[in-house]
């Protein structure tokens, strides 16, 4: 109703101006008619205007109601009335909706083809990597170690590519179950043991063997791997420790992965979860793609977890994953 009155405010303003103009015209012409005649005419015109406004509102009330409550869950494609303007608006909305759906379907098909292509390409790349791995047996130890390191980088890069593409279909690619957190941490460390050994860094797991959380095993392992790779890559020197701990909180379980690395500058802390952001330290070490922590945050959102990061320059970084009991 308010929108209707606002829309017709100019009409009522001009009507009022007209009602003031008519007595003025009578006065200027010296007409001697009684004022009651003029007042009667003005009253009659006001009644006609009121009837017109009521008729107009009844014709277009659905349109004004939709416009007044747009975005509140109503179906905007419902009929808006049989008057000319509501019908025109309804046709416009149906046309826009049809165009939107066509573009959305096209986008979905394009994305599906892209994801399928990425998946096929990653699997095809595994074959030459396996061949290179086999040929390392005939290469001297010093050269083999260097090639092995690059092979691991390639594997981790391909893994990140495939998980990034799968993120678009996350709803079709996860299964929440009860997982023993210590087992998942040990598996993540085992999968990256060569990286730990090569960098001379020790992994220390202090998690109750019976502590369980609800999550997806595959995605959780990927998250832990990304955090561990960051922890090792940004810990210079040898003899240092990456610790994995967990404890029960008020609303769930908190897992923490803490390193003794270079830390993150305060200016970069608020941006570390942004895609492709490497920060000042990442540009110095040339190890970061800027996607690891971004993927961790996105996966946590989809699984109902929460991730936080705390860091100090020169002292190290702690990444915490919060597992809710209601996941």
Image: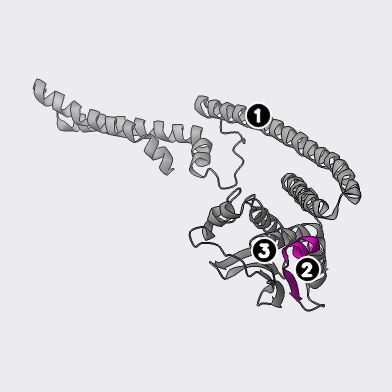
Does label 1 or label 2 sit earlier along the sequence?
1
Q: Is residue 282 above or below residue 63?
A: below
> What are the residue bounds of the magenta stretch?
193-205
The quarter holding residue 293 reads: bottom right
* Quadrant of the image occupied by residue 119: top right
Q: Earlier in the sequence, mark 3 or mark 1?
A: 1
Query: What is the quadrant of the C terminus in the image?
Result: bottom right
Q: Residue at x 61, y 49 (%)?
A: 275
- Label 2 environment density (alpha carbons within 10 Å; few <14, some 14–19, many ≥20): many
Direction from residue 139 to residue 20 in the image, left or right: left
User: Mark 1 falls on what kind of element?
Assistant: helix
Give the quadrant of the N terminus.
top left
Q: Secondary structure at mark 3?
A: helix
Q: Residues within 10 Å of mark 1 (few under 14, many from 20)?
A: few
Q: Is residue 112 magenta?
A: no
Q: Estimate the spatial distance between the alpha carbons at disc 3 and disc 1, rounded to whole Å.
A: 49 Å
Mark 2 highlights which residue? 185
Tell whether label 2 touches label 3 (CB within 8 Å): no
């Amino acid at each position: 109703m308010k929108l209707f009155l606002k829309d017709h405010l100019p009409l009522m303003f001009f009507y009022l101006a007209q009602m003031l103009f008519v007595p003025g015209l009578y006065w200027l012409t010296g007409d001697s008619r009684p004022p009651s005649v003029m007042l009667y005419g003005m009253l009659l015109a006001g009644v006609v205007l009121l009837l017109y406004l009521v008729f107009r509102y009844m014709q277009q009330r659905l349109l004004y109601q939709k416009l007044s409550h747009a975005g509140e869950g109503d179906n905007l494609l419902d009929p808006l009335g049989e008057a000319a303007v509501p019908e025109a608006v309804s046709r416009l909305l149906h046309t826009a909706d049809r165009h939107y759906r066509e573009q959305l379907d096209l986008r979905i098909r394009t994305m599906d083809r892209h994801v399928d292509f990425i998946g096929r390409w990653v699997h095809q790349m595994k074959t030459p990597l396996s061949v290179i791995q086999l040929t390392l047996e005939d290469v001297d130890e010093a050269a083999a170690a260097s090639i092995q390191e690059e092979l691991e980088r390639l594997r981790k890069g391909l893994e990140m590519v495939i998980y990034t593409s799968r993120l678009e279909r996350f709803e079709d690619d996860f299964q929440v179950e009860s997982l023993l957190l210590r087992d998942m941490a040990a598996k993540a460390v085992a999968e990256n043991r060569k990286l730990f050994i090569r960098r001379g860094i020790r992994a220390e797991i202090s998690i109750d063997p019976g502590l369980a959380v609800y999550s997806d095993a595959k995605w959780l392992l990927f998250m832990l791997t990304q955090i561990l790779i960051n922890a090792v890559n940004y810990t210079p020197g040898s003899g240092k420790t990456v610790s994995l701990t967990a404890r029960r909180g008020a609303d769930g379980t908190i897992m923490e992965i803490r390193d003794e690395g270079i830390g993150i500058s305060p200016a970069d802390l608020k941006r570390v979860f942004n895609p492709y952001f490497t920060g000042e330290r990442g540009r110095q070490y040339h190890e970061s793609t800027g996607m690891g922590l971004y993927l961790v945050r996105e996966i946590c959102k989809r699984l109902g977890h929460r991730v936080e990061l705390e860091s100090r320059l020169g002292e190290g970084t702690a990444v915490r994953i919060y597992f809710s009991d209601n996941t």
